Image (cartoon, rainbow, N blue to C red):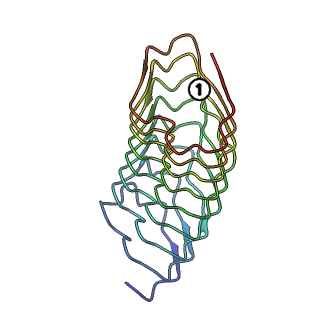
C-alpha cells in the first residue's frame, strides 16, 4: 500500500469504500472510472504525493476527509454533478490554490477548506444553502470572498486567521454572524452588506 504510485481503476468499479487508499503516501496519480458516483470518506486521506486526479462527471458527493491532507494537490476540478462537499473534504491541502465550486453544490461541510494555506480565490455559488462551520479557517492567502444570497449564517470561526483577506461581501440574507467569525483577519478592511 505504501509503495503504490499510479492506479488506474477499470470501468467495472462503481464504488470505492471508505479509506480505500488512505495513507498511500507515494501515490501520485489515480484514474477513476466514469461509473463512480461518490468519493467515500477518507478515500484519499493523507495521500501526500497525490498531484493528479480527475473527478468523474457522475460523482455526486465528496465524502468526509475525501482528500484530507493531500498536500501535493494544487488544483482540482469539481464536476457539475457534485452536490455535497463533505466535512474536512479538502482540509489541510496546503498547496491547493485553484478550485472551482460548481453551481450544483448545495452543501459545503464543516472545515471543508480549512488550512488550505495557498488558496487565494474561491467563489461560492448561489446554489450553496449550507456553509459549514470553520469552512475557510486558516486560509491564510485568501484575499476576498463573496457570500451568496442563499447563505443565512456565517458560523463561529468560519474565516478565522485568513490573514490576507481584505474584503468580504455579505448578502442581505445573513441573519447570524458567529463568534470570532473574522478573528485574526488582520488585513480585513471592508465588509460590504
In the depicted structure, whether residue 42 falls above or below residue 173: below
**Rendered-image quadrant of the N terminus:** bottom left
Q: Quadrant of residue 65?
A: bottom left
Which residue is at the front of the view, 134 or 38? 134
Above or below, 156 against 15 in this view is: above
Residue sitting at 60 percent across and 29 percent down?
A: 103
The residue under the point 62% across, 64% down is 95
The residue drawn where x is 57% and y is 16% is: 149
Residue 181: x percent and y percent? 46, 34
Is residue 118 or residue 100 the one in the foreground?
118
| Farthest left residue in view | 18
Q: Name which residue lies at 67% across and 56% down.
A: 97
**Picture coordinates of residue 39 (x, y %)?**
42, 53
Residue 98 is left or right of residue 139, and the answer is: right
Residue to which mark 1 is pinned: 147
Give left or right: position of 181 versus 43: right
Amino acid at each position: 500500500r505504501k509503495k503504490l504510485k499510479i492506479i488506474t481503476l477499470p470501468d467495472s468499479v462503481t464504488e470505492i469504500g471508505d479509506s480505500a487508499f488512505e495513507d498511500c503516501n507515494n501515490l501520485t496519480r489515480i484514474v477513476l472510472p466514469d461509473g463512480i458516483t461518490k468519493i467515500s470518506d477518507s478515500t484519499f486521506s493523507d495521500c501526500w504525493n497525490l498531484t493528479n486526479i480527475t473527478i468523474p462527471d457522475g460523482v455526486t458527493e465528496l465524502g468526509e476527509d475525501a482528500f484530507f491532507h493531500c498536500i501535493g494537490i494544487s488544483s482540482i476540478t469539481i464536476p457539475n454533478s457534485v452536490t455535497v462537499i463533505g466535512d474536512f473534504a479538502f482540509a489541510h491541502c496546503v498547496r491547493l490554490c485553484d478550485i472551482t465550486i460548481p453551481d450544483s453544490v448545495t452543501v459545503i461541510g464543516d472545515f471543508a477548506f480549512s488550512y488550505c494555506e495557498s488558496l487565494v480565490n474561491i467563489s461560492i455559488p448561489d446554489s450553496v444553502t449550507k456553509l459549514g462551520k470553520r469552512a475557510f479557517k486558516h486560509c491564510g492567502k485568501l484575499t476576498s470572498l463573496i457570500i451568496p444570497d442563499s447563505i443565512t449564517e456565517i458560523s463561529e470561526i468560519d474565516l478565522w486567521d485568513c490573514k490576507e483577506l481584505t474584503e468580504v461581501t455579505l448578502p442581505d440574507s445573513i441573519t447570524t454572524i458567529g463568534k470570532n467569525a473574522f478573528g485574526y483577519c488582520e488585513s480585513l478592511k471592508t465588509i460590504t452588506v
